[in-house]
Amino acid sequence: MSDKELSYKLSLYVDGVLPDEEARALEQYIAKHPDAERELRELKAMKQLLAEKEQLKPDIGFWTRLSVELDHLKEEEHNLLPFPKRFVPAITALGVVSMVAVGVILFQEREQVMSFLSETTEGVQQVYEGNFLQGAITPLLGHLDKDNVLQFALFGTLQLDEESETSLRVDETTERGYTIEVGRPLKANAKASGELERNFAALTVEEFYNEIKPTVQQKEMIDSVLRLTQKQLVASVFMSENEALAIDPSLPKLGRVTVSGIAACLEQAQRVKFEKLLNAHNAPYTVVKTVAQSDAKRRVEQAFAKLQQTNQPEQFMIFTPDTLMLQKLEINLDSLRESMPRMAQRTRVNFERFAKQFGRTRNDQQVTVVGSHPMKVRTGDGFFSIEVGMQPEPPTDDVMQIVQPRRQRPNFFYFEQQIPGSNMEFHMVDSVPYTQERLDSMMYMMRVGRVKSYGPKLDSLMREMERKRAQNDELREQEPGF
Amino acid sequence: MSESEKNVRQAVNLAGVDAPAAFRGLRANPESPAARSKNGNTLDSAFDQKSDEVLITLFQQGDEGVFRILVDRYQEKLRNLIFSIFNEPAIVDDLAQEVFIKAYEALPNFRFQSSFYTWLYRIAVNRARDEMRKRKIRKWLPLESMMESKDREFHEKMTTHPDTSGAQELVSKGLQQLPEKFRVAVVLKDIEGLSYEQMAEVLQCEIGTVKSRLSRARSMLRKVLKPLLDEI
């Protein structure tokens, strides 16, 4: 018998579970083998020792501690389940049955479901594709100083990029809505015409102060007005990496608010000087000279309150080379401030290409309804103009009534057009000749080039003007909004 | 419902115990017998003498108060089982509590296919195994090397202190030298006194496996305790 077999049988033997016959055979074996007998003896002793092993005393506090734990357990169960635990199987079964039922219904209505999913997918795709602002977004007006802000307030003009001489110009006209123009200012023409030159003479804050002669307190207030305007301007115009331009639709109104704020800070006599200054510079606004002096303080407070409404606009007008739309944008200005120093160079490069592309693809006569606003786009070489048909509510604030829009608008932008069949060119110094009023105010500047006699050519030019006038009359009848 | 479960439920009815009426809401009704046994010191002998199966049936019918009787009945055995496996009094209570909590959670699904006693032991052994794995109690060394070298203190005690109390300590320590599955087998058989069939239920293996495992475990332990056994 091997040691292993012997140990196995001895183990069963001491437990009394070895069959009788095997037990007797084992006993005979043990009698003849002292080692086996010793192992049996040791096994019995060991079994005895283990059986007598010291036991723990009963713990009378065991149940108390256990019941506390059980109570905690019950509380947790109650907190987790909104129904008794015994309902879990029933509720699970109910859930499974409901899911199966929904599955069956979906299967039966699969055509409609697939159709719905397809439409949804297309919608999502459209939204994705409609995300016209892509890549990094740069604020275009992060570089403005006080002089720039004053220039904007008085003339609605903002230089987007000094080097490339690209400007944004806004014009609020209560009759028809407002206009946003982007292009080059007419410096070349200004040199050729003394009358026009007056329009483009920049007015610095220092010059303004010299003219108006405000007190120290008034200066501080006007500086505050300009700072608040500057803050709003920064959050108004952005360009994205894919060369889409986003402009706050309410931007044209900001100029009037600022001028009103400045005017509210002035005394009666100073307002007269201010009006003269505006008139001399052919600014789009005129200051009402006679207002009750007693309300001055309230007007100043109103002006500041308006300018402090720095809530970001919900929607921006988005311009891409082939799209014009209103889109909701959420822009984190704080994160953009870091990129402002690098903005100027980027803007110059991107904007020139943008303006060219936009000019190529837009149809001048096309009216686009964006949101609830009809918009008309006109493009020329290096500029484009968007006229937004909007009937703004008349201002109810006292402060806004100090300043009224001036009918005649200054001429800042130009385009050149070659007359077909001639070597003569003319410069039209108004960009939006849509209406009779605009046509009446248009200024044409003839420039004789290499031709010696321009009589017949002039007739041709006048015919072209008449044709345009007729076109615009027709257009106005079709679209009274303009 | 299994046959054994039917029998138990029948036994409950024959005993004249209207379980739902008498025992439901033990905690809510302080006048119920089971509640008195909990709140006072006078354990109701009628309930104390009920079989495990009857008590479990009552528990499953909603009388959670009878769980205390089951705990009182087995807490001492369970605590000693854990103590024998680990030989550490400090962890006995925590582990025993965990075992009873697991039993409390699982008792509604008890199907009477084994006795409550072996079922409870199975939970305890499984929990002990988890604990041992967690604590990496695998310090079992080859017997020869242990006898030769590192545990000299143990060896000296084995040879020089064969008195009874010292012997008990040495047996406990010798038991700790065994690998987990052999140690549990020895504890269940020689300390707890389970039958081979009960051991098979607790360890969830065949009876033949239990026999061979126990034989090997005893051989190992005999070698470990040889100096002590020689003295005896």
Image (spheres, rainbow, N blue to C red):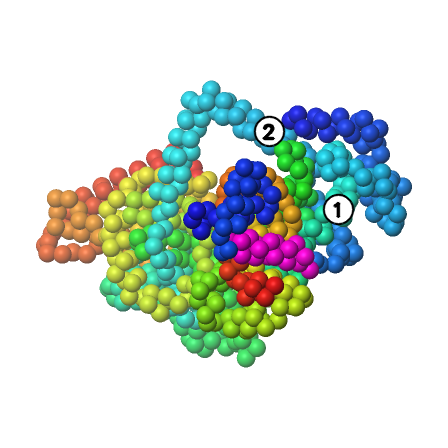
Work out whether residue A217 or residue B3 is closer to the camera in this orientation and state it.
B3
- Res A61 quadrant in image: bottom right
The three-letter code of the residue at mark 1 reads Arg
Label of residue A93 in the image = 2
Task: Count all numbered tags in the image, as a single digit.
Answer: 2
Q: From what the image shows, is residue B50 above or below residue A453?
A: above
Please give the range of residues in magenta.
A36-54
On the question of residue B157 being in view, the answer is: yes
Q: How busy is the neighbourhood of tag 2: few (under 14 within 10 Å), some, or many (20 plus)?
A: few
Name the secondary structure under disc 2: helix
User: How far across and down, in percent of the image, does residue A27 sit?
Assistant: 54, 46
Which residue is disc 1 drawn over?
A: B73
Q: CA distance from mark 1 to mark 2?
A: 37 Å
Q: Quadrant of the N terminus of chain B?
A: top right
Picture coordinates of residue A213, whole percent (x, y): 50, 77
**Residue A257 location (% of width, % of height):** 51, 60
> Subunit of mark 1?
B
